[in-house]
Structures are given as structure tokens and as C-alpha cells.
């Protein structure tokens, strides 16, 4: 018996889902008018948007690291962010070179300004496509797990982060792609597979000129969970503008178009971060020949839910079929939701100390 030898490579397009929905309604896919296809596509968007009200979809959980700014206590979730699952205050170690190492800029500027822990100074290069590097010194390889960039200029950059064991041959550590930089706003990147080497650098590849207030190569991060406040608790705080090095509470304001995180106390240290794990909406339904951001285990549930919605709008679908599709949609949604969990063990520890004193 010959098997395909592949898993998850079958491409299911939006049009394919709509065709299946039509047939389950007892219609030929070819019968659908352009208006009915558009309506089915919108129904698909509606049902995917509603999934977040049913439970957390684990494939739609993202992580964002915010560089905290002194005296700024409001931070926005990315568009589509739904709820904060966990918010953590974070600080980390910033290794420095030994006596044989140092910093370098390939295109002018005062390179020390990018590493002096002073956000009011900057290394501004004088020509495009330059790089700024650190050499940690002989016999002093350093592991880097996170990189922070504090620009002194706004614009669209194509900067890559690279590492080297000898300062001659460089390899890509992280390529974020085209990124919008905002003057004075940190960009933080966590490196999933870090390296332990002597040399690191940032290099612009898109024709722009680097100007950095700080370039932060960090490791050994420490994260502390922050407590969540409700609206009443936050609004009742008598000193909302109180500042401290470490915020330890937050209020999540579910406003539109972007939800906001309000920190308390107001952070005063510009070299610390906040790590936020959050749930988000599933990506929008694209054109008819695109794919959905849905795992394979959800396909049957999505098709039956779409079929039921289409049956309510297509003419001539009998009531018995509508009821059948509704039942199948509920069945397969339940199966998919039952599987949508992390399956981690739960431990219950009874408190018997009152009986053993």
C-alpha cells in the first residue's frame, strides 16, 4: 500500500470551503451567484471572528515585548489583539566587552553613544547601509537572547542582526524584514535560537542611514508577573501618576480600534521591558484563492458552520437540512473545542495545615 508520505500539504482555499458549503446545502457550487459567493465569504469572516467568544484558539496567541518608556504608562496591543493572558515586567543583563574588545561603527558617528545607557545621545552614521558592532573580546564569548534597538530617527528600515565567531565571517541571527522605526520608541526582539559568540552587529540593507540612541544586546532576563486590575480598582487609585522603576499592576482597557494596557506605578526606567502574551483574532479571510489561518483539525467544524450559515441565506434549502447542518456544526465545533487545550497536568494540593498545627 502506497501512502502520500506528506501531512498538512493539501491546500484548502476559501473558494473550496464555499463550494463544499454549497453542496452540503444541496446546491451545486456552480449555481451560486457572485453575490451569494460574496455573502458566503462574509459569513466565513463572521464565524471566524466569533470563535474568540467561544474560547482561546491556541494558534492565535502571540507574544509582544514592549520597551517601557520613562513616564509613559499606556501601551497599545497590536490591531486584532483581544485580551491579555499574561503581562510580565522584565529586566535583563547587558554584557560589556573585556579589555580586548570594544565597539565599532562602519560609517562614522560616535559609536559609544549607542552603548552608553543614555537615551539622550546617539550614534548617527554618515552614509547608508552601515553597521554597528560589538566585540566582546578574546576568550569572552557571550550568549545573546534579546536585542533592543532605540532609534534616533523615524522611517522604514531593513536592518538585520548578525553574529560572528571571528569578526570576518558573519551569519544571520535575525532578519525582522522591513520595519517601521519611530524615533524614541524601543523595538525588542527575542532570539529563539541564540548564539554564544564574540561578535554581534546590526546592519542596514535597505539603503537607509543608521542613527541609534541605544543598541542593546541582552541576556539572563528575569520576568515578574504583574497583577491585573479591574476598571474600578484602577480608576480608584489616588495616585495614578506615581512613578517607580518597576510597575507591578496593570489595567487592560478593551477599547477600539486597539486595546490598551495601563501600567501602575508609571515606569521610570527606560531600559526595562514588558512581555505580554495575548489572544488575538484569527487573520482576515482574504481573496477566494487564499487560505485560512486555521489548523487542519478545525476544517470540518468550519465547513459545517459555514454550511449552516449559508443554508439560512440560500433560497430553497428545506428546514430539515437546515436543522441537520445546525446539529453537525454544533457537533464538530464541540469536538474541535475539546481538542483546543494545552493538556498540561493540573495538581490539587489540599491545605491541611489547620489540622496539623
Image (spheres, rainbow, N blue to C red):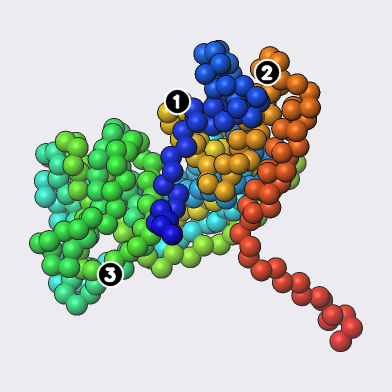
Q: How far apart, in angstroms, are the residues tagged by discs 1 and 3?
A: 44 Å
Marks 1,2: beta carbons within 8 A: no
In the displayed structure, does residue 243 sit left or right of residue 348? left
Give the structural element (helix, strand or loop) at label 1.
loop
Q: Residue at x 57, y 48 (%)?
A: 297
Q: How far apart, in angstroms, are the residues tagged by discs 1 and 2?
A: 21 Å
Residue occupied by mark 3: 196
Give the structural element (helix, strand or loop) at label 2.
helix
Image: 44 above or below 339: above
Asked if residue 191 can be seen in this view, the reply is yes
In the displayed structure, does residue 233 sit left or right of residue 171? right
Give the structural element (helix, strand or loop) at label 3.
strand
| Residue 313: mark | 2
In this orientation, which residue lies closer to the viewer: 10 or 180? 10
Going from the N terminus, do you reach mark 1 or mark 3 first? 3
In this orientation, which residue lies closer to the viewer: 251 or 337? 337
- Residue 168 percent location from the top left of the image: 10, 62
Q: Residue at x 28, y 34 (%)?
A: 156
| Residue 73: mark | none
Residue occupied by mark 1: 287
Q: How many marks?
A: 3
Asked if residue 84 can be seen in this view, the reply is no
Q: How far apart, in angstroms, are the residues tagged by discs 2 and 3?
A: 60 Å
Going from the N terminus, do you reach mark 1 or mark 2 first? 1
In this orientation, which residue lies closer to the viewer: 280 or 342? 342
- Residue 84 percent location from the top left of the image: 60, 47
- Residue 194 percent location from the top left of the image: 33, 64
The nearer-to-camera label among 2 and 3 is 2
In the displayed structure, does residue 145 sit left or right of residue 160? right
Image: 307 above or below 237: above
Amino acid at each position: 500500500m502506497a501512502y502520500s508520505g506528506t501531512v498538512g500539504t493539501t491546500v484548502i482555499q476559501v473558494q473550496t470551503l464555499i463550494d463544499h458549503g454549497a453542496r452540503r446545502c444541496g446546491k451545486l457550487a456552480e449555481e451560486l451567484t457572485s453575490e451569494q459567493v460574496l455573502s458566503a465569504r462574509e459569513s466565513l469572516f463572521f464565524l471566524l471572528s466569533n470563535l474568540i467568544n467561544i474560547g482561546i484558539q491556541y494558534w492565535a496567541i502571540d507574544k509582544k515585548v514592549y520597551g517601557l518608556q520613562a513616564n509613559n504608562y499606556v501601551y497599545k496591543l497590536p490591531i486584532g489583539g483581544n485580551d491579555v493572558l499574561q503581562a510580565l515586567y522584565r529586566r535583563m543583563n547587558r554584557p560589556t566587552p573585556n579589555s580586548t574588545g570594544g565597539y565599532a561603527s562602519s560609517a562614522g558617528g560616535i559609536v559609544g553613544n549607542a552603548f552608553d545607557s543614555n537615551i539622550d545621545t546617539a550614534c548617527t552614521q554618515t552614509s547608508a547601509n552601515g553597521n554597528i558592532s560589538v566585540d566582546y573580546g578574546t576568550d569572552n564569548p557571550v550568549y545573546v537572547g534579546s536585542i533592543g534597538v532605540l532609534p534616533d530617527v523615524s522611517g522604514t528600515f531593513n536592518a538585520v542582526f548578525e553574529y560572528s565567531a571571528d569578526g570576518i565571517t558573519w551569519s544571520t541571527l535575525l532578519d525582522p524584514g522591513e520595519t517601521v522605526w519611530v524615533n524614541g520608541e524601543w523595538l525588542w526582539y527575542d532570539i529563539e535560537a541564540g548564539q554564544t559568540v564574540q561578535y554581534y552587529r546590526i546592519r542596514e540593507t535597505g539603503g537607509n542611514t543608521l542613527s541609534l540612541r541605544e543598541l542593546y544586546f541582552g541576556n539572563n532576563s528575569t520576568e515578574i508577573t504583574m497583577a491585573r486590575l479591574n476598571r474600578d480598582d484602577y480608576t480608584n487609585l489616588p495616585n495614578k501618576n506615581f512613578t517607580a522603576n518597576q510597575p507591578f499592576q496593570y489595567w487592560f482597557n478593551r477599547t477600539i480600534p486597539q486595546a490598551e494596557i495601563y501600567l501602575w506605578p508609571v515606569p521610570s526606567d527606560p531600559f526595562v521591558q514588558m512581555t505580554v502574551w495575548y489572544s488575538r483574532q484569527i487573520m482576515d479571510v482574504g481573496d477566494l484563492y487564499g487560505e485560512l489561518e486555521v489548523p487542519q483539525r478545525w476544517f470540518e467544524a468550519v465547513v459545517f458552520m459555514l454550511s449552516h450559515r449559508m443554508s439560512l441565506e440560500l433560497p430553497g434549502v428545506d428546514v430539515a437540512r437546515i436543522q441537520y447542518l445546525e446539529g453537525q456544526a454544533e457537533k464538530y465545533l464541540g469536538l474541535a473545542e475539546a481538542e483546543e487545550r494545552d493538556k498540561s497536568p493540573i495538581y490539587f494540593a489540599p491545605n491541611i495545615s489547620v489540622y496539623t498545627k
